[in-house]
Image (tube, rainbow, N blue to C red):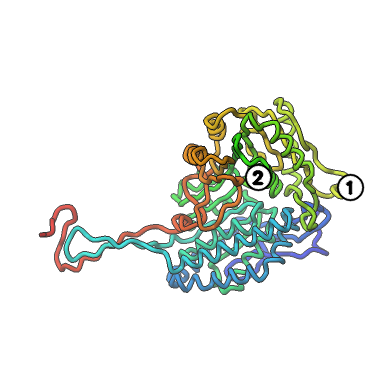
Amino acid sequence: MAITTAKATTYHNFIDGAWVPSVSGDLFENRNPADSGDLIGVFQKSTRRDVERAIEAARRAYEHWRLVPAPRRAERLFRAAQLIAERKEALARDMTREMGKILDETRGDVQEAIDMTYFMAGEGRRQYGQTVPSELRDKFAMSVRQPLGVCAVITPWNFPMAIPSWKIIPALVCGNTVVFKPATLTPLSALNFVKILEDAGIPPGVVNLVTGGGEEVGNALLVDDDVRVVSFTGSTGVGRTVSETAAPSFKKVHLEMGGKNVIIIMDDAKLDLAVEGCLWGGFGTSGQRCTAASRVVVHDAVYDTFVEQFSARARSLRVGDGVDPSTQMGPVVSRSQLDTVMKYVDIGQKEGARLVCGGHALTSGGYGKGFFHEPTIFADVAPTMRIAQEEIFGPVVSIIRCRSLDEAVTIGNTVQYGLSASIYTQDINRAFSAMRDLYTGIFYVNAPTIGAEVHLPFGGTKATGNGHREAGTAALDVFSEWKSVYVDFSGRLQRAQIDTADL
């Protein structure tokens, strides 16, 4: 499709405190997934040279920003949190227009950025180290956090303000500088976030925004020796490439990747509550969450009743434009994502799963210009089927039968991912057993697999991540390094582990 800028707003990169065009002069379009005729704006199709300029700006700014006392850095971030709160409704509406999810969800996305920014700003006065007694006389021992330098932040389209806040704000409060590459499907929300940081008084060069594709912008960030941290959220396949590409220069790499999350429903569960949780977990954000509940393992004793109730509720969900207050599920984000969902529906049918609800793209009436798909449920799914193993990232839920908690836990663990899991039961013993035995980074009891809060660590096991965590104070470990400091005021040479202090 040809780019037409006559009626479209042109947005720029943000480098060294200035909004500037790409050196390429090329642009790409940002369109509404609920109405592809709605051109939101055109953005910079950046090049390696743009990335190099942004990295150089961040490198220079780091020499000043790292010396600003952390409580003073935090004051700017508190102001940013206030600005996000003041602009919450406008930010949410922009996000619904470019990403598609309903307004309640985009308001939640913005609120998460508010919460994270307030929380991390508080860490400006709480970057605690350790003070410990030395084994030698007249010697003081402590540890302190130190920043690393320039951080590359690469974020996805499904949470276009929350996820950048999880990365950028802890990076800044620790004293690092940032080059930010957002997803090409949601650049406006990223730009809005960076504009708020500018308005909050973050100095030039401390945060830089470069829009464009992964091949040009992302790869340039991964290979530059001045980048010391890479924080990436996206697919496991791309995450593996990020890790391999960044490894030769010994960058610290944080990866948050895929999920194939499970809700277990036992025979004593409150079914009405479980149905509500599976609706929200499976079809919230049209299933486009790494924590989406795309598998439901149900005890044989309540299996048929659950399938009937869950499918009836899913059929009643109102699909439409996210700005309509009556809409309960918006479009998927793009034609490519819709094609992926349709491909997996076909795979599920060919594998022999029973399609009990949905299964079709919505193309007629008011749906013709968007990327809409029905809420879709497969029953009688075998745990080894592709639809039960592979991340679909769309409104497709697979229901699997089990006959015991042990069988359910085995099914839950038999995927390559380990992000989030959940159990519905009234038996505290079962709840604690599942909590212990499901190998995931997040676990819920009597709640769906989505709904993480900013003050606890977020992340997963196995192919979901590489051991780091976002959110909570654990995020500080991604964006800082420990330095142990010893001060010997004895006035003489003292040899640790050799010289023994007198009693």
Residue 294 in the image: x percent, y percent? 65, 39
Question: Relative to 416, is 27 on the left or the right?
Answer: right
Check the image and name the residue furthest to the left.
502
Find the distance from the CA under tag 1 to the CA under tag 2.
33 Å
Q: Residues within 10 Å of mark 2 (few under 14, many from 20)?
A: some
237 or 215, which is in the foreground? Answer: 237
Can you see residue 92? yes
Earlier residue among tags 1 and 2: 2
Residue under circle 1? 365
Whether label 1 touches label 2, CB < 8 Å: no
The tag on residue 273 is 2
Point out the image quarter for the C terminus. bottom left
Residue 42 picture quarter:
bottom right
Residue at position x 75%, y 58% from top?
97
Can you see residue 260? no
Residue at position x 52%, y 64% from top?
119
